[in-house]
Every structure is written in C-alpha cells, then in structure tokens.
Image (cartoon, grey):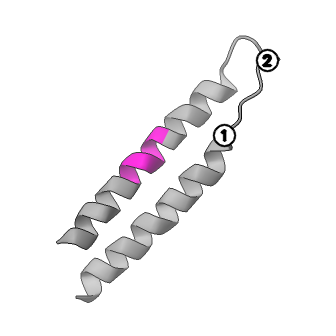
C-alpha cells in the first residue's frame, strides 16, 4: 500500500512540475531566469512514480 501512496505522490510532484514549466514558458518578462529545471524534475518524478508502481505491483 505504501508503494502506491509513493507513486501517487510522485505523480502529484510531476503534475506540479509540469505546471511550473508551463508558467516558465508563458512568462511575460523573458529576462527573468528560473533556477529550477522543471522538465528534469518532471521526468525524475515520473520515473520515480513508475518505479514505485512496479514495486507495488510486484508485491
């Protein structure tokens, strides 16, 4: 059960990272530089969610 919760949490993080990336791409002031690489955060969260789902299904 804990693996499914972790997978759901990672998907929430991936969704929030996607929202952060969208906000970064549609910003008005193009000179504002972001410090977080949102696509990398999103990809890491998706990989973590898939790994957690595999672990949950394996049990």
Magenta-tinted stretch: 11-16
The picture quadrant where one finds residue 28 is top right
Q: Position of residue 11 (x, y in %)?
A: 39, 54
Q: Can you name the residue that lies furthest to the front here?
A: 35
Q: Is residue 29 above or below residue 36?
A: above
Mark 1 to mark 2: distance in Å? 15 Å
Q: Can you name the residue that lies furthest to the top here?
A: 28
- The residue that disc 2 covers is 30
Q: Which residue corresponds to the image point at 31% horizontal and 63% vertical from the top-left?
A: 6
Q: Position of residue 10 (x, y in %)?
A: 39, 56
Q: Which residue corresponds to the image point at 82% horizontal and 17% vertical from the top-left?
A: 31
* Horizontal arrangement in the rendering, residue 58 relative to residue 47 (left or right): left
Q: Can you name the residue that lies furthest to the right here?
A: 31
Looking at the rendered image, the quarter that the C terminus falls into is bottom left
Q: Residue 36 got which mark?
A: 1
Q: Which residue corresponds to the image point at 46% horizontal and 67% vertical from the top-left?
A: 48
């Amino acid at each position: 059960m804990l693996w499914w919760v972790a997978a759901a949490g990672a998907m929430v993080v991936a969704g929030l990272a996607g929202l952060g990336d969208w906000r970064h791409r549609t910003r008005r002031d193009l000179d504002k530089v972001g410090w977080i690489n949102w696509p990398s955060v999103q990809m890491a969260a998706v990989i973590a969610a898939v790994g957690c789902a595999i672990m949950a299904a394996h049990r």
